[in-house]
Every structure is written in structure tokens, then in C-alpha cells.
Amino acid sequence: MFEKESIIQAIVVKIAKQTLGEEHPGTLSCIGSLANTYTRLGKWKEAEELQVQVLEIRIRILGKEHQGTLRSMGNLASTYSELGKWKDAEELKVQVLEMRTRILGKEHPDTLRKLEVQVLEMRTRILGKEHPDTFLSMGNLASTYRELGKWKYAEELKVQVLEMRTRILGKEHPDTLRSMGNLANTYRELGKWKEAEELEVQVLEMRTRILGKEHPDTLRSMGNLADTYRELGKLKEAEELEVKGLEIRTRILGKVNSDTLLSMGNLANTYRELGKWKEAEELKIQVLEMEQ
């Protein structure tokens, strides 16, 4: 499929050069698309040649700090890495990171993402995919993708982390359970409620057995699963979990605690959806009184 696509794109590039000129933004975009197709085909030398052309033109026309130029530098750096040109790749990545930091600031999501991608690439190469520090980098990058609203990218990374942690650490290890919970949260953001439910049921069962019913992590898992049940229309199941969670939190934390009040509010919402207006009203009044 990509082989045919590359032939068509090469023809488009030739036409763009003749009609628009070699340095026109449209031509550069066509060359970039062809280079990306070459990377998918594993034709790294051909991709490198095109990406060098695009980068040189963009630096000359747009300047080094333009977003298009920085994007081209990042693409070429990735190709250098695939070709084993680690020094060239590192030099470009450092330049990109320095400029993004200066232009966008240290804490901008794009700056953090670039840094985290680099750290992940280096840790994977040096330590291996299954090293704990590599897992940590994958988790950090997934969190940044989540902050950027790139849920599909976050999902892909979290699935990888969960698979490896399950294989290496076992299903019941705290880090594996945390990964399951993180992936379930991403599924919820993507509207994949059935997938979220499946994971959250497992997490709750294991945390209840290992940590006990009254552990904060167990209670958090109960709340997450209850939210998912509510979204799936399983209101009786949601009610049952929320009643349990509220009873435990009231006994351990007291009625005025913020977590207890949140549990009361959630249960009140579920009562309302079940048509239990009296119970819902009573809880809402209690929450309002204690928040004053």
C-alpha cells in the first residue's frame, strides 16, 4: 500500500516543483509527506535526503525558530536515530528543545513532550524497553499526551506499559494495578466505558483482597467503578458501591471530610437518576449544611 502511495507522491512532488517552485510551502508539504511515507517503508536514506532538503529551505525562508522548521528538525532527528546516527540526532534534538524552551517556556506541554520523548528514546536504547526507568518515562509521556488531549497516543503507551508490567511484575503488583487504573481513566476519556469497566472491576477486586476494603486506594477504585457504572446506566450497581464507600468514609474520616462530602454528592446524583428524590434531597441538604 505504502509503495504505491510513494510512487503517486513522488509524481505530485515533481508537479509541485514545476508549477509552484521548489521553495513554495505547498511543495515542501508534499516533500514532507513523501519523506513520511518512506519512513513507513523503512527507506530511511531516501527519507533523510528529502528531510534535509526541507529543513535547509525552511531555515533559510522561515528562520530556525519557526514551528515548521522545528517540526522538520524533529522529523530529521528521528530519521537519524533510525539510521544509527546518534550524534546527529542528539544535536538536532538538543537544538529543538533549547528553542522550544526559550520560545514556549519550560513548562509548556510541547516542551515537556519533546523532552520526555527524548528521555524515553534514550532509556529504551540504553536500558531496554522493560527497565523500570523506561516504564516511568513511558508513563510520563502518556500523562503529557493526556494533558494535550492526545488520548489515542496516551492509550497506546499505557497499553504497552500495562502489558509489560503484567508480564514482569505480575497482575497484583501495586505498579501494575496503578497502570490498570491509569488505562481505565484513559478509556473513560475516550468513551470506552465497557473497556474501562472491565479493568476497574479487576482493580477493585485485587485492591480489596490485597489492601482491604478501607484502604484509600480501594475506596478510590470503588468511586471510579461507580462512576463508570453510572455512565453505562448500571445505576443499581453504582448505588451499591457508593453506599459502601460513603459508609466507610463516614466512619473513618468523619462527615465533614472533603472526600466524604464528595461521596455524598455522588450518591445523591445516583439517587436522583434512580428517581429516589427524597433520598437525593436529604443528602444534598446535608452536603450544603456541612460545606457552610
Image: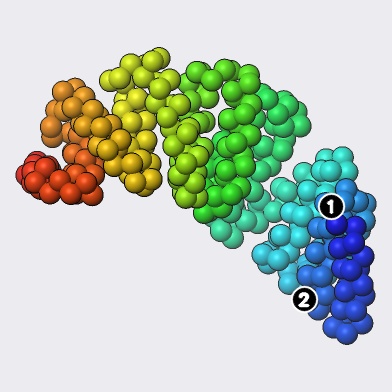
Q: Which mark is residue 25?
A: 2
Display colour scheme: rainbow
Horizontal placement of 141 versus 18: left or right?
Answer: left
Residue 59 at x, y = what percent?
78, 67
Horizontal placement of 114 versus 246: left or right?
Answer: right
Horizontal placement of 259 versus 173: left or right?
Answer: left
Tell me which residue sits at (15%, 46%) in the image: 276
- Camera-side residue: 21 or 7? 7
Q: Amino acid at mark 2?
A: Pro
Label 2 sits on a secondary structure element that is helix
Residue 161 at x, y = what percent?
60, 32
Q: Is residue 231 above or below residue 260?
A: below
Circles 1 and 2: CB atoms closer than 8 Å: no
Tell me which residue sits at (88%, 48%) in the image: 42
- Camera-side residue: 232 or 80? 232
Tell me which residue sits at (37%, 30%) in the image: 221
Q: Amino acid at mark 1?
A: Thr
Local crowd size for mark 2, using a 10 Å CA cut-off: few (<14), some (14–19), many (≥20): some
Q: Is residue 20 above or below residue 183?
A: below
- The CA span between labels 1 and 2 is 21 Å
Label 1 sits on a secondary structure element that is helix
Tell me which residue sits at (71%, 47%) in the image: 94
